[in-house]
Image: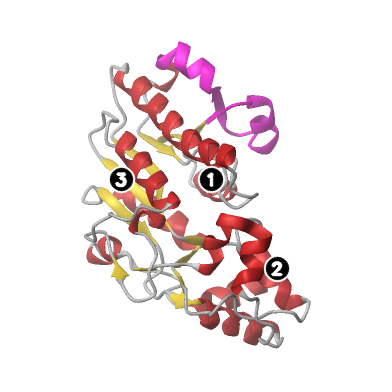
Amino acid sequence: MKIAIAGGSGFIGTHLIKDWHKKKYDVLLISRSCSKVKEQFPFAGCVTWDEMKSNPQTLEGIDVLINLAGESINSGRWTAERKQRILLSRVETTQQIAEVIGKLKTKPHLVINGSAIGIYGQSDTVHFDEDSQAIADDFLAQVSRQWEAEADRIPSARLVKMRTGLALGVNGGAFPKMALPYRLFTGGKVGNGRQWHSWIHITDYVRLINFCIKNEAMEGPVNATAPNPVTNDEFGRVLARQLYRPHWLRVPKFAMVLALGEMAELLLEGQHVVPKRALDHGFEFHYPSIDRAVQDLISRM
């Protein structure tokens, strides 16, 4: 198996590459700088975006291409300039992938392109699956829609649009930041605590990607979330219980908006999303419940 991945040096990509190395897959990273990649993954090949664009044949023979490239949405205030970077970092890289694949004599059997559950919009009452209409008009929904529209232009025998939820792991992502207030005895619900967290353990995320690679019936939008979303309040109570800490210090909405601006919606709003397509095709989660997932993550911290 030969897999090319863009965005491989991030939190999710790192876990994928380590898993594929154990499976003895041939991995090629697409990166802005190959020197850093070689330090992190000496066993993998690397090609820069510029090299790939000038010489598309570097991707000849690839079985699967996975594109997770995109600027992080949670590392700073959403200024107008930063929102534009967040959008373009996803749209432009996907456009480049489509252009390069279009020039290949032998195209990958499968392309998995990143997306996000933000495409469904935010609601405390509506439940979403892959058949739900993506008609919301907030910033994250717009980004996800344009991201998927570009992915639809990729010439591939099979395309999976991986709509990622809150991926939980101990060496990156949101979980260490969410656990920190509880470790400092200052944990509590954010806002009213009723907003949904549609989450997935990083182990199950890697397994779901591999499931999509092997199962040819997996195509189109796929929700990368566990089958049991929880509210912010429930999530906090599980964290508090597993860490033997109190769940008491509520963070008011106005404080989050004051500190983070528009980006506060990441913590104050949410959506109840279930992985209907994965479940319908027989995927079994190792961590279907938040209690089991948090217990495992804390044991690894």
Please report the residue visible at 70 percent of the width from the left and 88 percent of the height from the top. 246
Q: Secondary structure at mark 2?
A: loop
Q: Residues within 10 Å of mark 3 (few under 14, many from 20)?
A: many
The answer to the question of whether label 1 and label 2 lie on touching residues, with beta carbons closer than 8 A, is no
Q: Position of residue 117 (x, y in %)?
A: 39, 57
Q: Callout 3, which amino acid?
A: Val
Q: Nearer the viewer, residue 157 or 1?
A: 157
Q: Secondary structure at mark 1?
A: helix
Q: Which residues are magenta?
A: 30-57
The crowding category of the residue bearing disc 1, from other C-alpha atoms within 10 Å (few below 14, some 14 to 19, many at least 20), is: many
Disc marking residue 301: 2
Question: Mark 1 vs mark 3: which is more N-terminal?
Answer: 1
- Residue at 65% x, 76% y is 251
Nearer the N terminus, badge 3 or badge 2? 3
Residue 5 % position (x, y)? 47, 36
Measure how far apart labels 1 and 2 are at the Cα level. Answer: 20 Å
Instruction: State the mark number for residue 160.
Output: 3
Report if residue 287 lies within the magenta region.
no
